[in-house]
Amino acid sequence: MKAQQNFCGERLKKLRERDNYTTRQLANYLKTTEESIISWENGISEPDIKSLYVLCTLYGVSMDEFFSGVDATKLVAPVYRDEYSNAVWKNKFSRARRFPW
């Protein structure tokens, strides 16, 4: 649990600095205290799900992107996605021929 808190706090700080926000600006935007923002970033506490949603919207990232730290559109390259899809379909059709039910 502690590692996830640290990751969450590090990610929050990284995104805040990327978009040049201060902790005070975020606190005003979220209608919370500056101490809350600092405690989230230091892993002392965690933001609630509503605050995380608002922050992800503000930063332009999905929740998946936030927790993975990777742009979700780049997780699987289109070429590999097509090759994988073809392999799955070939496997399904080959099994369908062997097992008619």
Image (spheres, helix red, strand yellow):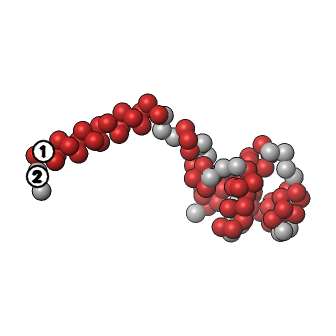
The amino acid on which the numbered mark 1 sits, given as a three-letter code, is Arg
Which quadrant of the view contains residue 56?
A: bottom right
x, y percent for residue 31: 84, 68
Q: Which residue is rendered at x = 61% and y = 61% of the image?
A: 2
36 on left or right of 65: right
Q: Which residue is rendered at x = 57% and y = 49% of the image?
A: 68
Query: Camera-side residue: 77 or 13?
Result: 77
x, y percent for residue 81: 42, 37
x, y percent for residue 28: 87, 63
The amino acid on which the numbered mark 2 sits, given as a three-letter code, is Pro
x, y percent for residue 94: 17, 41
Disc 2 crowd rating (10 Å Cα; few below 14, some 14-19, many 20+) is: few
Check disc 1 and report its element: helix, strand or loop: helix
Vertical position of residue 28 compared to residue 58: above or below = below
Which quadrant of the view contains residue 89?
A: top left
Query: Camera-side residue: 86 or 34?
Result: 86
Do the numbered discs 2 and 1 sit on residues whose CB atoms are within 8 Å? yes
- Residue under label 2: 100
97 on left or right of 90: left
Residue 79 shows in this picture: yes
Cα separation, mark 2 vs mark 1, equals: 6 Å
Check disc 2 and report its element: helix, strand or loop: loop
- Residue under label 1: 97
Vertical position of residue 80 compared to residue 6: above or below = above
Query: Camera-side residue: 9 or 28?
Result: 28
Disc 1 crowd rating (10 Å Cα; few below 14, some 14-19, many 20+) is: few
Q: Which residue is rendered at x = 72% and y = 65% of the image?
A: 51
Residue 67 shows in this picture: no
Dividing the image into 4 quarters, which one contains the N terminus? bottom right
Q: Which mark is residue 18?
A: none
